[in-house]
Structures are given as C-alpha cells and as structure tokens.
Image (spheres, coloured by chain):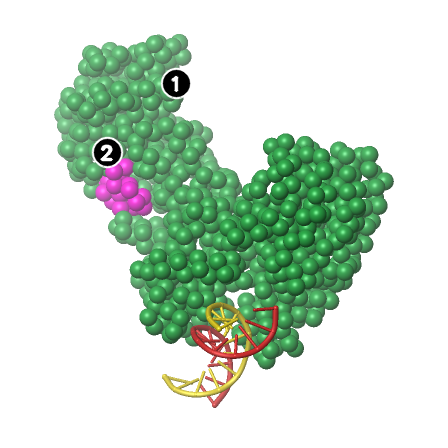
Chain colours: A green, B yellow, C red
Amino acid sequence: MDSPEPSQIKHTPSLSTLNPSITPSHESPQVQESPFLRFVNTLSPIQPVKASHVTHGFLGLNSPPLVFKSPRISGHHREAQSSERPDGTHLSGGEISQPDIADIGDNCVGEAHGDLKKLNPQQPLSEGFTTDAQNDISTQSCSPPPSVDKYLADPGDDQMYPVNLEMEQSTDAVGSSLTESEKVILEVDRSDGPANKAEELLPLLEESNMVHHERPAYSENLAIMEGEKDGAEWVPQEVTNLDSSSGADVFDNQHSHDSLPQCAGNDQRHHSDCTPQLMPDPIQDIKEFENCNEMMSTSQVNSENIPQDGSEASLKHHGIPRRCLQFGEAASVTLGSNTFHVKLNATSCDMKMLPVTASKPPGIGLHLNSIINAVPLSCPSSTGVRLSDGLQGMHSKSSITLHKVENAAKSSIPTDMDGQSFIDTRNKSHETDAPVAADYFISESPIMTESIDLYLENACDKRRVSPADTENTEEFNHPNTSKKKKKTNIDDADGPKGCNCKKSKCLKLYCDCFGAGLFCGEACACDSCGNRVEFQETVVETKHHIESRNPDAFAPKIVKCAADIPQHNMEDVDMATPASARHKRGCNCKRSMCTKKYCECFQSKVGCSSGCRCDGCKNAFGKREDFVAKEHALSKERERSIVEAALDEEALDDKLHSRPKMVTIRTGLLRPANHLSPVTPSLQCSDQGKQGTKYRLASADSTQSSKKSRSNLAHTETNDSQKNAPTGASSKESELIDLPPYQLSNRCGIRQLSGGSLRWRGSSPITPSINLDNESDGKLFDILEDETPDILKEASTPTKSVKANSPLQKRVSPPHSHLLRIGSSSSGGGLKSGRKFILQSVPSFPPLTPCADSRVVCNGKEDSSTAQRK
DNA sequence: GAGTTTGAAACT
DNA sequence: CAGTTTCAAACTC
C-alpha cells in the first residue's frame, strides 16, 4: 500500500497525458463522469471489461514501479506489485482483491465502483473507474502488468486480458470470496511454474523484470481460473459467452498447458471479443513475442513508440515491450482473435515495410544479424527496408528458435541470436551483405563505425565459433565453418574462413579477416594475431591508419547492385557478370589470366571491367575486353537516346519548366528524365573511383538545365589518370549554380550522388541511373559520352549497392569511408547510405537547400575531397 | 603438408 | 608514381 500512492501520483499524470480516455477511469473523476463512460458503465459488464483492458494497459503504464519490482518472485512479487500499483484500485492484493472481487461478482461494474471507492478513498472513484476497478480487480494480480504486459509481450498481455475477463465473470458467477482471492494468491505461486516457463520462452534480454510482472498477473489469472474451474464450470459458460467458439476448451487447454504461450493462445481464442490478444498458436505467440522482444532488443524500439506508449517505466524495458505493445495493441484494436492474429502478423509485416529510421541506430548493435538478413532482401536501398528485413529475419529466426526454445531456457535465446549470425554465414549473399549492411550503418552513423565494426567482427567470430557451439545452430552452421577452414573454404559455401597470417599479425589488409573488418576467430590459424577483440584499440588504430592512406581500404571491393540493376540493363546482361557487379579496383593479373582465384575479380565471381589492368583476361565471369566493347556500344546507344530526348525536350521547352528534372549530360546532350516514366533517374553509387573514368551528371530542370548544361558541354572525362583528381569540375559547377532553386535542389540530389558514372537503367534508356563513384565524389557530373566508353564500363562495374563477396572469402568490408564520403559529400541531403537515389520531379524543391549549399555541394572537388578526408 | 605461384598490399 | 618488397592466399604436388 505504501508504494501505491507514489506510484499513483506518478502514474496519474502520465495517464492523463497519455490517454485522456484512460485517465478518466482511474483518477480523474471528472472525466470519469463523462456521459460516455456512464453509458459504457450502463452497458453490459462485458464492455466495461474491454474498457478495462485499456485501463489495464494504462494502469500498467502507470505502474512503472511494477517493472522495478519485477525481479521479485511470485507471491511477494505479487503483493508488492499490488501495493505498488499506481491506482488506488490496486489495493494490496489481500485486502482489496477480496472485496473487490466480491463486489465485482455481485454488482458488476457500477456497484463495484462504490465498493472500490470505499476501499480506496484516496483515489476518487468514478463510474469510469468502475471499469477500471473491474480491470484492476480482475487483474489485480494481473492488472499492473497490463500496461507492462502490453509493452512487454503481446501474447502474454493478451492472455492476461482474457483471463481477467473470465476471472471477473467467474467471480461473479462463483460469488466473490476472500477464499478465492487467497487461493489465487496461493495459486499464483503455483502458477509461477508456468509463468516461469513462459519466461523461459521469453527471449527478452531484460525480460526478467517485465516477465515477472506479467507472470504474477498471468499466473494469478491462471490460478483463479483453475481454481474456479475446479470449483465450478461456470468458466466455460463465461467463455462461451465471450466467445462462442472457444469455450471450455480454452480453459482446459490452459489447464493442461502450463506454458504461457499456450495459455496465451487459448486466451486469445477465448477472448477474441474482449481482448485483442490472440495468437491462435501459442508458438506463434511466442514467436511474435520473441520477435517483438528481438525487435526491441535489436532495434530498441522506435522513438515514436515510446511516446505513444508513454510508458513511464524504464525506457529500456519498455522499449522492447513497447514494440510488442504496439503490435499487440494494434492487433487488439483490430480485434477478433483470428483477425487479430492476422493483423498482428500484418503489423509485423508492415513494420518490415516501414522505414524505421529510428530503429536503425539501435539495431546496429545487436544486430548485425538482423541487418544482414535484411540486406539481401533489398540491397541497400533504405535502412528502413533493412530493418524490416531484419525483422523478417528475426521472425524466421525466432520461429526457428522457438521450437528449441520452448524446451530450452532463456539462455537459449542468446544462442539464437548467434544462430542468426550463423544463418547469415550460410547464405553467401547474407555474408556478403553483412559488410554492406555494416556499411550502411556506418554511413548513417559514422560515430558508430567503430562499434559497428566490432559487431561485425564479433558476428564473424560468432559465425565461426558459434556453429560449433550450439546444436541449435546446426541449421545455420555452415559446413565450412569448422574451425580452420583455411583452405576448405570456398566458393559456394564460403563459410567463414579464417586467416592464416604469420607475419602481418592480422593487422594488415593481407589478412582477410582484418580486411573484412572482422576480428579473427577460432577459425583462424594466424600467428601472433593482433586482430582480436582484446586488441580492439590497436585494431582500430591500425584501421584508421590504413584508411588514412586509403579511405577505400575497407570498402567492399566488389560493388554491385543486384536490386538496382534490373535485368533490363543492357550492361548487366552484356557484362555477363552475375550480379552486374564489378571489382572496384579491378585486378592486375598477369599470369593467371583472371581464371584463378588469384584474380580478385574471378574470386569475387565478377567479370573484369575496364578498371582492370589484367593481361590476357579470360575471366569466366566476363572478359575485360568484352566488357569494354559492350560499354562502348552502350554508350553510343545512350548518346543516341539522349540526343533524341534532348531534341524532344527542346520542342517541349515550354512545358519543360514545369518538369522537374532534366539530367544534363555534359556532352551537351540533355537527357530528359521525364522520358523515363516517372522522371526519376536512379542514381547509383559506384566505387570505381580511382581507376575508372568519372562522369559527372548535372541535373537541372529540363529546360534551363538543359540549356545550361549545353553550355557546359565540356565534358570531363577522366581516365584512370584522374583517379584522385577531384579537381576540375568546379568551373563547370559554377554554371550549374545559376539554376533555379529547385533545379539546384535536384542537382544537389545528383550531386550527392555525384557518382562518377552514369548508368542508364531500366528498360528504357530514358531512365538513367547514376552511379556514384567513391572517388568521383563530389566532382561535377560528367556526362556520359561516346568518348567515354569507360564511363559505361565504370557504371557497369560498380553499381553501387555495395555488395561484397563473402566477407569471409576475400573480404567485403564495410566501406566506411565510402559511405561516409557519400554522406559527407551530400551536404544538403546527406546521402549517407550508398543508396540509389531517384530524382523525382520535385516541382519546387524547398529552398531549404540553399543555393550556396548546393553550390558547395556542386563543387565536386570539395565534396569529394572532404568526404574522402572524412 | 610442404612448396610454389600469384597478385594485392605495403613500402621505398 | 613507379618499382620493390612483403605477405598470405591459391594452387600444385
């Protein structure tokens, strides 16, 4: 009781603030009296119950203390909770619960209020309160959690609610009695068993607290349920009332099933009406729950969620639960158990789809795994996607783990996480992507780079190590993952292979592990390895040192955009490279003829490109000669199309003004983005950087830009000689500066992209995709021209979505520098990730991007230089 | 498993 | 920037 007041105080405000609707019930009598509430009260008790859910949720919300209490165990735990419960309604379990229950049973909602009021003079009880009171009563054991429950875990929560309802009704039918409440208490302890199981199931890292809260309530409910069941069969009746379908079976099921998930499932079934909860399958529930947890743990919840939830409890804890809550709530809102379930899934799906910006950062840490998973789905376009993907991955993982987990203890969960990494390792794509993902993270949060790297490394280690570790991971275990695979590794199955460094201490790029940004692990057979977690500082320093010399040192060597490059791409097809990927730097093979793994291109399973300096290239994935020839051909075609387009536009100049985007190629040819269906040229970043020629694109509004661009015709094509020379474009850029704001904006976008190479994408030549060259960075956008078949080459080579070959294979490391550059380069928009940018017709780009800024951006040199330096 | 070959990375 | 050396992986036997 002591605690309740403070808790109440705390909670009250929060509640009111959070949900006006909620507040009325508990503390604001004024609100309570609202006609609506009255009406509700007048309604069948069932409805109030529904309301109760809400209230519970709030109560739970209100009761952060509960969270703190969580560690407590069963009986005491409960009491403490009850005492702490914010609402006066939450009287001490013994005292309040009994009378309350009696009241409820006898009087239903309205009367209960009075009783409750009496019981809790402290709090102003209102009619609205009654509903709450019921909730509280029913839940008293449970009530606190509701909010918590919701936040913590959907399933659990869901379960709780239905149970509560039943409890209430049961109490009514049975007739309230202290004895029952006592029983409940006693049984609660018993119920702990199941609850514990549930906890085990719960993957939450921190869940313990949360779980405890939920447990007691849940356990109590179960206990009550059981007790009542035993005592009387009313329960089924009640159930039937609530839910025609489920009925007694549910109880039976609950009975039989101690595990939460099961119960939850049952509950869900039962309470489709009253409570949203509902995961038909306990397993699914668990999965969902785990997913939520994972989500939470990994992503740490969106900021958005937090406010909504308004949970007072520790953010951390709540964070996870909140995620769950959202899902749960959404589901609950929607309703029927089945529907709910579906929706829950749907929501999860949606979540996947959603671009969760906030989540990213959080996710970084954990979950490289998730990231990795995510990556494959959609190359690196948007973090949101990744996350979502990651979520999916999470789901899959969780599902997988569940089976194991059910029997297993909590500890299993972490293993699962590891398992994820394993999964990743299996799939080449995943592995390869991992670094990419990391890159993205890095790009987005440069600060995180180091940590990210570590994660990656750790992940790698896990990969290597874990497979052996957990049986569970068997699935994930890569066949190659045996400790020292040195030479076993390989192509398709590329498992993580360890390095075998003898003299470099694994602190040079010679070391594949180091080069991939990974720590050496068990799989490595290196001597005097300095690339271990213990030596993080050294490793980091070394990395910095290397990057200082070569910013791209840790960038993925193979750049490819699987997603970005549509089959349509002539280049891709022509290139004959599998994923339309190319080695960033190109190989320098002299004797191997690019037919052996000595050749990085070959090893990466990509064709050689113009960037290669190989002799007698016979790369099975694409000969350099062929590549060049094709590029050349393509470039001509493009020119043609461009010219045509330009002509067309000229005719349309008047209209063009309205049109947002023209991409001007320095060749003087205008490319009407408009031609392309949506006027959106996609830009891709390509890393060829040093080697390749760099092309600059200037996009501006169709007419003006085109004109200007024409004036600017000077096309700067840089051959390999230009490698690092960011210089030159500035003068050209100046021209661009004059463009109207929106034009500028467009430019800026392009600039950000400022990739060196252009690439036409899409079936129609109209849609150009611009590849960003790391090196080209900030430079003016060069126009693709005939003269520059190389351009095409480049473009083809590295389309930007970075995809490294299996890191394990030969390295794919997160291109910090690369991404960072990009981000830096894009002063205005900050294209941090190597995303593909689509120039859309943005009629008037908000002046937000001041011309000056754009100009600055336009100066490729500066951008590039700064970016690289960064 | 030892030795050779190869080419990238590092160094001058 | 070119040339050389170092290094470790890839390859061969």
- Residue A273 image point, x, y percent: 39, 28
Q: Is residue A590 left or right of residue A302?
A: right
Q: Is residue A397 visible?
A: no
The residue shown at (35%, 57%) is A537
Q: Which residue is the site of mark 2?
A: A68
The residue shown at (48%, 67%) is A810
Q: Which residue is the site of mark 1?
A: A20
Q: Residues within 10 Å of mark 1 (few under 14, many from 20)?
A: few
Mark 1 and mark 2 on one chain? yes
Disc nearest the viewer among 1 and 2: 2
Question: Tag 2's secondary structure?
Answer: helix
Q: Is residue A108 left or right of residue A679?
A: left
Residue in front for this viewpoint, A621 or A629: A629
Residue in front for this viewpoint, A552 or A189: A552
- Tell me the subunit letter for badge 2: A
Residue A147 tag number: none
Question: Tag 1's secondary structure?
Answer: loop
Looking at the picture, does residue A416 appear above or below residue A507?
A: above
